[in-house]
Amino acid sequence: MSFINKRAKQKIAFSFFSLVSFTVVAILFVILGFIIIRGISVINWGFITKMPEEGMTKGGILPAIVGTLCLIAGSMIFAFPVGVLSAIYINEYLKENWLKKFMRSMTNNLAGIPSIVFGLFGMALFVDKLKFGDSILAGSLTLGLLALPVIIRTTEEALKSVPNDLRVGSYALGATKLQTIRRVVFPIASPNIITGLILSISRVSGETAPILFTVAAYFLPKLPHSMFDQAMALPYHLYVLTTSGTNMEASRPMAYGTAFVLIFIVLVANLLANAFRRYFGKKNKMN
Amino acid sequence: MKRKRLKIFEKAFGVVLFSSSTVTSLTVLFIIIFLFNEGIGLFNSTPVEQKYKFIVSNDNTVKELTSKQLKDIFNYDITNWKQVGGKNDSIILFTINDLSTYFTDDELGANFENLPSKINELIKKQPGILAYLSDKYVPSQLEGHVLPLTKITVKEFVTGKEWYPTSKPAPQFGVLPLILGTLWVSLGAILIALPLGLATAIFMAEVASQRLRNILKPIIELLAGIPSVVYGFFGLVVLVPLIQHLFNLPVGETALAGSIILGIMALPTIITVSEDALRTTPTSLKEASLALGATRWQTITRVTVPYARSGITAASILGIGRAVGETMAVLMVTGNAGVIPHTFLEPVRTIPATIAAELGEAPFGGLHFKALFALGILLFLITFIINTSVELIKTRKKS
């Protein structure tokens, strides 16, 4: 009797769990579906190639797209090399000592800092102290700092997944540390490092709080010319369109379109990263 | 020769590596230094506009006023000097707008050249006066004295119940409503996210087949990848009207809306971290339990979950941390009323939302600006404590 009870309980619990899990999945699809369905009708060639017009109720979002691309490029030029080099140093060069622990915990802490605090810091250091002003440069550096822990973490994981035997084998053949890293460790780890890069691009492209006070322009219907220019950006543009437009009803379709483009970038980046991981994961296993 | 060059190159590379990791690990310190540099000036400064003074009669025995008292005086909630520790005398407010009630234009002169002397007369005549004056109108031979204001203290900042940073003449920098708002929204979020997240984690770690898990995992990651401003947008156009309609509220922008959106945003963290924790439970323990005749469900509740308890705790703390620091989504759906909330159906304002909403308008280097950086320090400290406690839980588990 009690056995049947036990089974029944398990059945109820498991069906409850699967129900909850599918609810979570459903939430994602509702959000994505809502934005994609509402947004796709707005998207046309003009929307992504025109300047905003008539108080942002007509026209397109070209400057915001360009601004976001500039920020992605700028932040990655800074964060990718620094992040990868840091991870190599922490993982390959440091012995298990206090320094390694310190650097690990510092990067962990960096990952936990709220994005608005990065924004405050970027404003105080880059905009104010270093006199970059509200500029793509200041915004890129701020976003780069935000992306650093993501890149370091994924790179470290990639490096850890390289079997130690390979390193030892390389040393045994007389290779130096640098040669080993360049010829043995890095080629094997690189697909996962690239995955990290793509994921951090997806993260950076959607961040709003760090760019509020470092780069973002409310309305700037021209393309940036140098890295010292202000720029519009997709996430900030979406925020502006939804909360402080002059005619919010009329700019709603623009907001859906902007959200769609933003989601599109993030989705593509995520799918790409996943495909990359799977493809090279399989290939590595086969070797 | 080649060997030597290689060695130099190797050394140089080592230096580059070392410097980049130093930059990375010192960034946190830099952030602290810069936040303090900008924000610390709030404390030990007087909460009054620059180039303005409060003047009282020489007979007045009040030593100093806090900005709270000042605000109450200007709102006529305090009307007698006795209430702020002085003599029994009613307070007579005088600002530059009251000029015409006391003096005629002729008396003041065409270019207000007689103003300082007239003010002196007034201060002498009215022992209960409290004059709020710009420096340029303060008489050079003052017949009264400048009433100092209490400097802003850390305690006042953290426990003050009112956040009116732009109110004149007495801005109020009390962050308690913001702290409570942040806590309300974050706790609400975790109440929503923890049961959902834990159930999903258990499902993924213990119940689902490998194939199903391989489908679920990227979906959860995608949930983490959606930008917060998109969550905020979704919340604003779907959730807020829904809540307004459902509960028949004047506005739908409430703590509840914030909690729901933040709950969804905290889900991936909670799911991933607790799933990892559940997976660390040794198979031998589970098998032993099953061998004793327990069902899988009993094994989960009695063996797996208790074993992973610390990991699950870490997951919920991390989830709270995410919620506390989240800015844009909260800014868009909580209504941003800087008052102490009493129910989940009221608008609230959180610390990050306050910074995001107000920094753009705060005059550079002013008190309000400094106060927002002080809020940043507070936020940093809160998340720092949260992250450190997670680290501690994890290391304790290992040992």
Image (tube, helix red, strand yellow):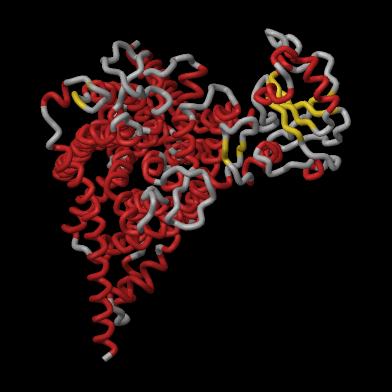
- Residue at 37 percent across and 41 percent down: it is B332
**Image x and y of residue B54, in percent:** 74, 27
**Against B61, is A48 above or below?**
above
**Image x and y of residue B140, in percent:** 80, 13
Which residue reaches farthest right? Answer: B59
From the viewer's perspective, is B145 left or right of B170?
right
From the viewer's perspective, is B256 left or right of B245?
right
Q: Is residue B366 visible?
A: yes
Q: Nearer the viewer, residue A151 or A259?
A: A259
**Against A211, is B110 above or below?**
above
- Residue at 72 percent across and 33 percent down: it is B151
Q: Quadrant of residue A136?
A: top left
Total residue callouts:
0
Q: Nearer the viewer, residue A175 or B171?
A: B171
**Image x and y of residue B303, in percent:** 37, 71
Q: Nearer the viewer, residue B122 or B379?
A: B122
Q: Quadrant of residue B15?
A: top left
Q: In which quadrant will I find the N terminus of chain B?
A: top left
From the viewer's perspective, is A258 left or right of B394?
left
**Against A223, is A164 above or below?**
below
Q: Is residue B314 visible?
A: no
Q: Nearer the viewer, residue B26 or B384?
A: B384
Which residue reaches farthest bottom? Answer: A1
**Image x and y of residue B194, in percent:** 38, 59
